[in-house]
Every structure is written in C-alpha cells, then in structure tokens.
Image (spheres, rainbow, N blue to C red):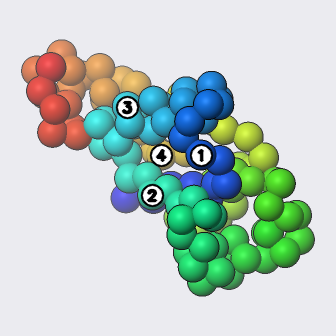
C-alpha cells in the first residue's frame, strides 16, 4: 500500500488552499488512501526524526513546506496538490472509486 506523508507548517484555518487540500485529503482517505499529516508546530519530533525531511528543511528551509513523501521519497514540495495529483500520489484510481460507488459501498468503509 502507498503511504503519503505530508509535512506542513500551515494551520487549518484562514487559508483557502489549506482548506481545499484538507477537503481533498478527507475525500482521498474515505476512498482508501493512506495519508499521514504532520504539522511542524505540533509534531516537531516527526520532522527531526525523519532524515529525508530533516535534510530537506536544512537545505531548503521551512518556507519550502509543504513537503509530500510517497513511501518515504520526496514527491512534491512547496505547494498543495490538486485532487487529481493527490489521487496519483496516493495510488488511487477514479475508475475503481466509481466502481465501488456504483456497487453501493466505498473502499473507505462509507456506503453510498
């Protein structure tokens, strides 16, 4: 299974890009994506303990966040992905999601 890790410095409130991304993450999780989110203000140890993230911040600085890792590898940084990009990062398939909805139940455990 693909794991997407998001390392961010933004708070959830006041920023439309963050709100849109949060909506997309919730949708992706409901459709089977495994996404882990870390905020530097609340979970600084997650940033320090991950060598890839620590090196990225040491090299690029905190202003280059958000950082997206897919199975531990840098996949995107500096901006939030669109829903389509998040689908690709998480290894989801619109066709499979549509089939699950048509069958009456989504893979995330939520029935249509």
Q: Is residue 41 above or below residue 8?
A: below
Alpha carbon of mark 3 to alpha carbon of mark 4: how far?
12 Å
- The quadrant of the rendering that contains the C terminus is top left
Disc number at residue 26?
none
> Which of disc 3 and disc 1 is earlier in sequence?
1
Alpha carbon of mark 1 to alpha carbon of mark 2: how far?
15 Å
Q: Is residue 73 above or below residue 32?
A: below
Whether residues under marks 1 and 4 lie with C-beta atoms below 8 angstroms apart, the answer is: no
Residue drawn at point x = 54 percent, y = 30 percent: 19
Residue 80, x across and y down, in percent: 66, 38
Disc number at residue 36?
2
Q: Secondary structure at mark 4?
A: helix
> Would residue 49 be seen by someone viewing this image from the given angle?
yes
Q: Residue furthest top?
A: 102
Q: Where on the picture, by quarter, is residue 57?
A: bottom right
- In this rendering, the label closer to the viewer, 1 or 4: 1
Residue drawn at point x = 29 percent, y = 36 percent: 30
Q: Secondary structure at mark 1?
A: loop
Whether residues under marks 2 and 4 lie with C-beta atoms below 8 angstroms apart, the answer is: no
Label 1 neighbourhood size at 10 Å, few (<14), some (14-19), many (20+)?
few
| Left-right relation of 72 to 67 | left
Task: Identify the residue position indicated by label 3 in the image.
Answer: 27
| Left-right relation of 16 to 97 | right
Alpha carbon of mark 1 to alpha carbon of mark 3: how far?
19 Å
Task: Identify the residue position indicated by label 4 in the image.
Answer: 90
Residue in the foreground of this view, choosing between 27 and 90:
27
> Which of disc 4 and disc 2 is earlier in sequence?
2
Q: Residue furthest right?
A: 59
Task: Identify the residue position indicated by label 1 in the image.
Answer: 11
Residue 1, x across and y down, in percent: 37, 58
Residue drawn at point x = 36 percent, y = 24 percent: 95
């Amino acid at each position: 299974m693909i794991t997407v890790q998001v390392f961010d410095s933004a708070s959830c409130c006041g920023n439309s890009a963050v709100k849109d991304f949060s909506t997309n993450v919730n949708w992706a999780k409901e459709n089977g994506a495994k996404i882990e989110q870390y905020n530097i203000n609340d979970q600084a140890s997650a940033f320090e303990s991950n060598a890839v993230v620590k090196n990225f911040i040491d090299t690029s600085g905190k202003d280059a966040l958000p950082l997206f890792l897919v199975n531990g590898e840098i996949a995107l940084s500096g901006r939030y992905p669109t829903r389509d990009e998040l689908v690709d990062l998480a290894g989801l398939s619109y066709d499979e999601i549509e089939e699950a909805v048509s069958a009456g139940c989504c893979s995330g455990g939520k029935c249509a």
